[in-house]
DNA sequence: AAATATATTTAGACAATCCTAAATATATTT
DNA sequence: AAATATATTTAGGATTGTCTAAATATATTT
């Protein structure tokens, strides 16, 4: 169907489109893909030929319905594989991404259908991100960033924004994981650092940390 | 490490080397890979540069130790994935090869180690072929082709030589599977067809069929 | 609005992999 | 051993995807 390279571009454009409401810029794609703007322009033309994106010179690209659907299916595969690696093969949440980047390109309808069944139809991946269903529908949970919550509140960790190995290992080290109850004791006005408690343990975290943890408020 | 294409060539050469004791010919590789002899020559030069094969013009290629080891590890991955697909994801033995051809190229030491453990260290794939261990050792079972066995003997099916969908579906239809007891009642001298019985059911099979089923003799 | 900075595209090139057609080497017949 | 057939390599080219450098368009400053 589509090449590995085309699939990676589609995924990148999809993720960039979430934020920007205008066409996604060549440079933004180049940065995300860690490649050169000229390479992006080349690829955009190919994707446009194949009706995966709409493109007007200098105006950026938008995914077509076909392009969007293709991207979502790749994300679905990526996240299902991540679940498999963590739940069945003893991978930790900081080890799965690289392998899932490869596995997401395996082409087999049956494989992904059976994997989904085997994993008992998971709805989120190890980082708290939603897994699109067969039809490409994504249920967006109403989650908030921890740094937006007021002191005194009790929350539950439901996801991470930064999924880098460094950040995930930091969280591991400090006993922060999906499902953990996080109580916010104080928020320092000066640098927005927070004093939180998890399992009766106090911990001070920087704004950089609190702005990369998704939570939902408890009992609401 | 190595490209998908390079890996596929190594695997093909490895399999061809099993039979031929001389260097593997360009044409043999071309036929196996369903490509052109000129493409094979191109690739052989690349593999030779990378010390994966030794090559003398017009004399065919031989895998180096490195090439052999690389090929065996790919075969190991291929067969482990086939076991996974059949045992865990409800694939039938005629459906796995195509997907395993893709999965065998996923690069992750940990993945294959954990998959092996998850499957409880299987020693053979769904077609009865041995799975090389971590160190690349292959235990060659002493199996015989059914057409070499004399009438009156009782055997157990332990593998298939032809793994094409058509042949595997024929076996399914006729209740022939790994582990089944096959009793040989008659062998027709004229065309070497056989009358066999499986689960008290009689079946006449052609020489083409009996020469693609591996068995071991019972009680010996 | 002109000058400057930034973003984007184009031109030209390169590596990997495949192909066809032609040239050459090796093997088989006669 | 010459003639013929078969196998293999080489030459030249296409495609995909990448890159650098130059050209051009758009955005921002002054
Ligand atoms: Mn990921
Ligand atoms: Mn994830
Ligand atoms: Mn196979
Ligand atoms: Mn097999």
Image: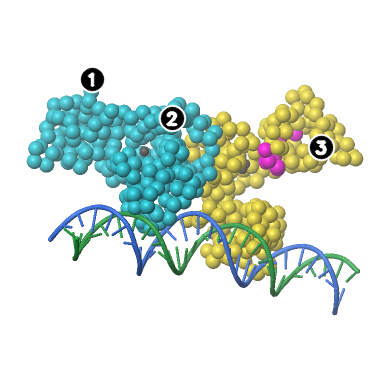
Chain colours: A cyan, B yellow, C green, D blue
The lab-note entry on whether marks 1 and 3 share a chain reads no
Instruction: Point out the quarter of the image occupied by ligand 4.
Output: top right
Q: Which mark is residue B206?
A: 3
The lab-note entry on whether marks 2 and 3 share a chain reads no
Graded by Cα atoms within 10 Å as few (under 14), some (14 to 19) or many (20 or more), the crowding at tag 1 reads few
Position of B190 with respect to B57 (left or right) is right
Position of B123 with respect to B220 (left or right) is left
Position of A153 with respect to A46 (left or right) is left
The image quarter containing residue A139 is: top left
In the image as oriented, which residue stretches furthest toward the top? A219
Mark toward the viewer: 1 or 3 = 1
Residue A42 % position (x, y)? 43, 55
Q: Residue at x 36, y 32 (%)?
A: A130
Residue B170 % position (x, y)? 72, 33
Graded by Cα atoms within 10 Å as few (under 14), some (14 to 19) or many (20 or more), the crowding at tag 3 reads some
Q: Residue at x 80, y 34 (%)?
A: B205
Q: Which mark is residue A133?
A: 2
Q: CA distance from mark 1 to mark 2?
A: 28 Å
Which chain's residue wears label 3?
Answer: B
Give SS at disc 2.
loop
Specify start and end residues of the magenta stretch as a single range: B155-165
Residue B162 in the magenta stretch? The answer is yes
Residue A11 visible in the displayed image: no
Mark toward the viewer: 2 or 3 = 2
């Amino acid at each position: 169907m589509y090449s590995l390279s085309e699939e990676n571009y589609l995924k990148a454009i999809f993720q960039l489109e979430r934020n920007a409401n205008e066409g996604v810029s060549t440079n933004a794609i180049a940065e995300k893909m860690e490649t050169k703007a000229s390479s992006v322009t080349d690829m955009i033309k190919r994707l446009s030929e194949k009706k995966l994106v709409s493109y007007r010179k200098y105006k950026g690209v938008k995914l077509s319905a076909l392009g969007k659907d293709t991207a979502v299916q790749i994300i679905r595969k990526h996240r299902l594989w991540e679940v498999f690696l963590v739940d069945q093969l003893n991978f930790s949440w900081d080890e799965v991404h690289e392998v899932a980047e490869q596995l997401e390109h395996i082409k087999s309808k049956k494989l992904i259908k059976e994997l989904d069944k085997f994993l008992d139809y998971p709805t989120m991946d190890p980082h708290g991100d939603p897994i699109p269903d067969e039809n490409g529908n994504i249920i967006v949970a109403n989650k908030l960033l921890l740094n937006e919550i007021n002191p005194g509140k009790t929350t539950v960790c439901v996801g991470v924004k930064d999924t880098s190995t460094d950040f995930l290992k930091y969280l591991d080290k400090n006993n922060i994981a999906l499902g953990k109850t996080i109580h916010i004791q104080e928020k320092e006005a000066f640098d927005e650092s927070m004093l939180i408690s998890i399992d009766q343990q106090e911990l001070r975290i920087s704004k950089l940390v609190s702005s990369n943890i998704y939570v939902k408020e408890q009992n609401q």
